Amino acid sequence: MKPTEGNQRIGIPAYFTSHAWVEARFDKADLFETKQGRLMFRAMEPLLRVFGFLGPAVRLHNEYLFVRHYAQEARLRQIRPTCIVEIGAGLSPRGIAFASADPDLRYIEVDLPNMVAAKRRALGGFPYPPNYFLGTVDLLAEDFSKTLPEMPRPGDRVAVVTEGVTDYFNMPEKRKAFRNIHSLLLAHGGGRYLLDIYARENFPQLPFLTNTFIRTLGRMVGRSFDDQLFERVADARRFLVGCGFDEAHELDLAELNTSAYQPPLGECTYRIVEAKVGEEG
Ligand SMILES: C[S@@+](CC[C@H](N)C(=O)[O-])C[C@H]1O[C@@H](n2cnc3c(N)ncnc32)[C@H](O)[C@@H]1O
């Protein structure tokens, strides 16, 4: 693969979420338990408790994360793709879990080289299911789709997923990412794209909290979020259509979330959006 232009530091939060998936007992999450992830998760717990008075977005931060992961999985189970391409999968156990549970599904998981190396290390001697494919890509690269480790096959119902990825990109990068995903789906007969959107309209109306959170995360991943979040989810939907998608709509999180975690969804800082390419998508 040619040298990547992706921002490797966006991988840091992937360690935190890998432990979140362990805590929430997602299938196969134990395979990806890392010391780094556990330490980050444990270090955050007291902070979330101490600053919990600021509101549910802080107090229930981890529950909202569990719901995000659960809701995307619930939607994938509803639409039953025959091929899933998850981009920026980090140390998520979903690919291994879904591929192990359904031999008729092909699950293609891709990420930047350092994260894929970490995932391979975590998997160690675990036997990969034959319908699971792991490889390196840069979602922002011109030749993104040519570098996938496996391609959807003719007749596949294809779904692309990103979780906790695209809001780390600024607007020109989001445009590149969405156009690349649109082209991938178009080249394979259409399909659906699931993603989470953190829009400013869904952040708590406490400027101190919002700014501190956004700045801290920005420092961690080495970039400023000042100009990279959509104001409204509707802006994100329009942006996706501007990148070629036929349509994009917000999914009903309450309907998808049948998990054991039931935080008040009105306070949730993200929404799950589904964008489509083609009639069947
Ligand atoms: C916050 S982590 C989320 C990981 C995983 N989706 C989860 O929810 O646990 C963001 C992921 O996006 C990946 N990423 C960042 N830029 C990327 C790019 N240009 N191409 C592919 N993956 C990228 C990072 O390496 C990291 O694994």
Image: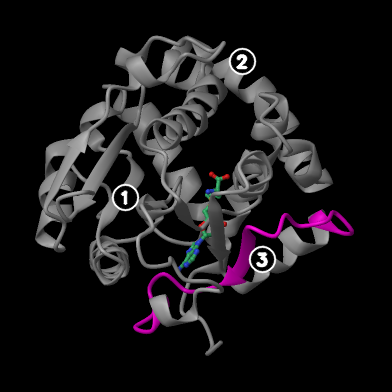
Q: Magenta stretch mostly in which secondary structure?
A: loop
Nearest to the observer: residue 113 or residue 155: 155
Magenta includes 23?
A: no
Horizontal side of 174 relative to 277 (left or right) equals: right
User: Image point 40% across, 42% down: which residue?
Assistant: 214
Amino acid carrying mark 1 in the image:
Tyr
Nearest to the observer: residue 204 or residue 87: 87
How far apart in space, not on screen, are marks 1 and 3 (Cα)? Answer: 22 Å
> Residue 114, how many percent across, how many down?
66, 69
Question: Disc 1 designates what residue?
Answer: 193
> Residue 130, how many percent across, how many down?
70, 60
Mark before the other along the chain sequence, 2 or 1:
2
51 is higher (above) or lower (below) than 165: above
Mark before the other along the chain sequence, 1 or 3:
3
Question: Disc 3 designates what residue?
Answer: 116
233 is higher (above) or lower (below) than 136: above
**Where, quadrant-wise, is the N terminus in this rendering?**
bottom right
How far apart in space, not on screen, are marks 2 and 1 (Cα)? Answer: 35 Å
